Image (tube, rainbow, N blue to C red):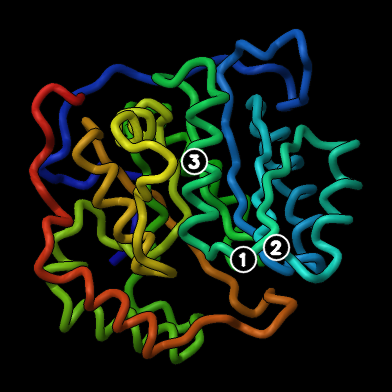
Amino acid sequence: MELRNRARTSRYKRSIGGWGFRAPTRGCFDSSRRQKRVIYVCIPAHNEAPTVGVLLWKVRRVLGEFDRDYRLVVHDDASTDDTQEVLQRYKRSVPLAVLGSKERIGYSASVEKLLRHVVKEAPYPKRDCAVVLQGDFTEDPEDIVGLIRVLEGGADIVAGAMEQGDHSLPRRVRLVRLLSRALLRGVVARAPVSDPLSSLRAYRVIVLKKALRDRPVEQRLLESEGWASNVELLGRLAPHARRIAESPLGLRYDLQQRESRFKPLKTFMDLARLRGGTLWSAPETGTA
């Protein structure tokens, strides 16, 4: 099935006004423009020294050519390699904020810290957005442009969606995707997008703000890890979105510069634990 930038029909879809804006030239950082609408690119990282610097530079190029204002936010999750040193060097050349933890807190907690930071910093929550991007180059920064175009067209959440049956993925990754779709229909098939497993998404900040407004830092938004946390995050945010859409996504596992951390059995079991809950509950009245 060919994916196109389109809104997926769901019970979360309603009409909404456009989100278009004119941002600073070439997406450069300018302190006099702090109140302009901003794309916050959020990158969770643990021992990503070989790729995170090049990734930051490519995001800078892509969003500069796209002519949008942006900020990069990286959470260094207790890296033991040179990730922190690389990030400090790049702070001189890109608009970068570095968050961190002295002890390993895991992927989902890192993502949550990044999103909470954006909610706190974003001056225009109805217009600004957050994009979650992996630090290992498996996700292409070029795909951010497609997400933002759809978001500017009126969506509150735009999910990157893999084309089903993509044979470029490692076999173990394809297997877990196929089994999840076949055996965990309540988790995967009922989602408001065709691919709830992928992490690359754009969220309008107002959606994040509504989801977090009654949750202090001590009360975690996400309790799962890995792919399950991607599904859980969508389930937590979807009730606050008036329109959810998707955009094509390509994954490049061949560009990883370290050993893969993907564990097929654990990933499937984590997804299975999401069954029987209220993951895809109806939208809350008055939240849109």
**Amino acid at the residue labelled 1:** Arg
Type of amino acid at the residue the image marks with label 3: Leu
Q: Is residue 67 left or right of residue 113?
A: right
Which of the two marks, 3 or 1, is nearer to us in this view?
1
Horizontal and vertical percent position of residue 286? 13, 22
Mark 3 sits on what residue?
115
Q: State whether residue 230 is above or below residue 63.
A: below
Apparent side of residue 183 relative to residue 63 in the rendered image (left or right): left
Q: Quadrant of the N terminus?
A: bottom left
Q: CA distance from mark 2 to mark 3?
A: 18 Å
Which numbered disc covers residue 78? 2
Q: Dots 2 and 1: beta carbons under 8 Å?
A: yes
Between marks 2 and 1, how big is the CA–CA gap? 5 Å
- 3 or 1: tag closer to the N-terminus: 1
Please tell me which residue lies in front, 36 or 78. Answer: 78
Determine the secondary structure under disc 3. helix
Q: Which secondary structure lies at badge 2?
A: loop
Q: Is residue 34 above or below residue 6?
A: above
Q: Which residue is mark 1?
A: 104
Neighbourhood count class around disc 3 (C-alpha, 10 Å): few under 14, some 14–19, many 20 upward: many
First reached walking from the N terminus: tag 2 or tag 3:
2
Q: Position of residue 61 (x, y in %)?
A: 76, 41
With 14 as the anchor, is 42 left or right in this view? right
Query: Do the CB atoms of the residues marked 2 and 3 lie less than 8 Å apart?
Result: no
